[in-house]
Image (spheres, rainbow, N blue to C red):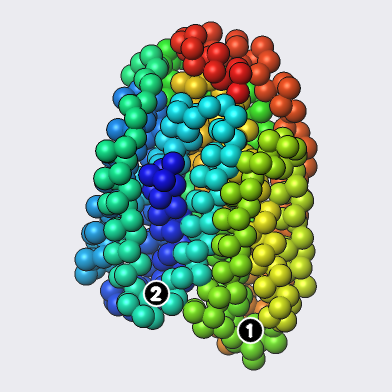
Amino acid sequence: MACLLLGVATFGLLQSFVTPILPIIQSDLHTSQSTVTWVMTAYLLSASVCTPIVGRLGDSVGKNRAFVLALLALALGCLVAALAQSIEVMIAARALQGVGGGLLPLTFGIIRDELPPARVPGAVGTAAALVAAGSGVGLALAGPLSDAFGYRSLFWIPLTMVIASAAAAHLLLPESPRYPVGRPNPLAALALSAALIAFLLSISEGPREGWTSQRVLGGLVLAVVCGAAWILTELRSRNPLVDLRVMALPAVWTTNSVAFLFGAVMFASMTFLPQYLQTPRSSGYGLGSSVTQCGLYLLPQAATLIALGLAAGRLSGRFGPRGVLQLGCALTVVPFAIMGTTPRSPWLIVVTSILFGIGPGLGFSAMATLVVQAVPAGRAGVAAGMNANIRTMGGAVGAGVMASIVAVHVAGAGYPSRAQYREGFLFLTAVAVLALVAARLVPRPASLSSAGIIEHAEVAIIPAAPLGQATAS
């Protein structure tokens, strides 16, 4: 568990480490603001494409081997980024780091394979919460570490963590079971990759070029066409990359719906809350925080994410993951409603930060538990990977729409108006409410091991032992 948690926590750090320091990277590598955003976009695209592919690789060749390979790719990406002297090399390094997106589904699959069923919910919840907590810690520590050691330390520090995790995983992780899932159709991987790239690129370019521009609309149309081609290919394939029968299970598609909406509010808040806090006081609403002060405001969020991740397993055991998910969604509505009033009081920002940690800390862990328990063991990696992928896609949509609300018609002083932030946070409040509604649609645990899973398991030719374990858990 220590090997697994160190790996996923490092990936979580790298998700958000660069967000507060993009202006520093822009200045140091002598590039433009539009170009430096690719440092985040390349990472997002790579993680979206690699997550389901690496998850499927783990199901076929062994999750422990795939876990070590994903860590080595992440380490190489950190090394290249720390040494990069041009924006092109930095972007390539971030794309390489995105391969680490496969760590999360591999971790869930290893937990499912190795731990007794009674311990699976707690372990899965802890791992899922640590990814979110890593993102919160990254936002909080980026400023102080950059000020003290330079922004390249934000790649050297994760590099040491990844190397330690890879060495421990190679020596300590047991050989994981392999399932006869066969070799996936390469056309499915190509179509899925093209659909994700076209979709995420269009969403990221929408706020800058306009949602009705030919480039954005053309990209969305291409995403739909490639997505349809992927679905048809998967349905006809004997060895699908992502078994759509699994994705159609009620416990899976409803949980994925929550993941999409949860991702929208989380990514958008991670992007725009620091900007809000750093807005000058002369604006009439900002706190004029430095990058370091902004990190201190966000530190309670990271602390509560970790604490709730550790407690989520016990809560799921007592109240069920469905109840924990609904509670997390309900608590997520509150901080966005508070931010909709655009508060200037520091103590109210701290309270909001704590609530930002409590809601997602419960929600992320419960979603991971629901998905892993709902599918046969041989499909756990891919199903968990798609859940993480859908959360990323939701994050891209949420951040894109939030940018369209907040970043348009920027005032002459160079920052949005108070009304724009208010409208943006109220939009995220509405999305959080929709996430709560979707969580209510998740079936109760009694129906998670019903005939639907058994029917799918027979179609997927899953061995009897993993199926029995899946049904029991």
Which dot, 2 or 1, sits closer to the camera? Answer: 2
Residue at x 75% of width, y 28% of height: 444
According to the picture, the residue beneath numbered tag 2 turns out to be: 145
Residue nearest the observer in this picture, 306 or 248: 306
Residue furthest to the bottom in view is 282
**Left or right: 204 as drawn, with respect to 64:** right
Residue 454 appearing in the image = yes
C-alpha gap between disc 2 and disc 1: 22 Å
Q: Residues within 10 Å of mark 1 (few under 14, many from 20)?
A: many
The residue depicted at 53 percent of the width and 8 percent of the height is: 458
Q: Residue at x 72, y 81 (%)?
A: 345
| Residue 255 in the image: above or below residue 43 | above
State whether residue 53 appears in this view: no
> Which dot marks residue 287?
1
Report helix, strand or loop for mark 1.
loop
Tell me the quarter of the picture where residue 61 sits. top left
Which label number is shown at residue 458? Answer: none
Kind of residue indicated by mark 2? Leu
Q: Say above or below: 320 vs 433.
A: above
Q: Is residue 32 above or below residue 209?
A: below
Give percent across and percent down for residue 221.
Answer: 51, 40
Q: Nearer the viewer, residue 447 or 23?
A: 447
On the image, which quarter does residue 406 sit in?
bottom right
- The answer to which of 189 and 143 lies nearer the viewer is 143
Q: Earlier in the sequence, mark 2 or mark 1?
A: 2
Q: Amino acid at mark 1?
A: Leu
Q: Eyeballing the image, is 2 above or below 207? A: above
Toward which corner of the image does residue 450 lie, by quadrant? top right
The crowd level at tag 2 (other Cα within 10 Å; few <14, some 14-19, many 20+) is some
Residue 347 point in image, percent of width and height: 71, 78
Residue 80 percent coordinates (x, y): 23, 59
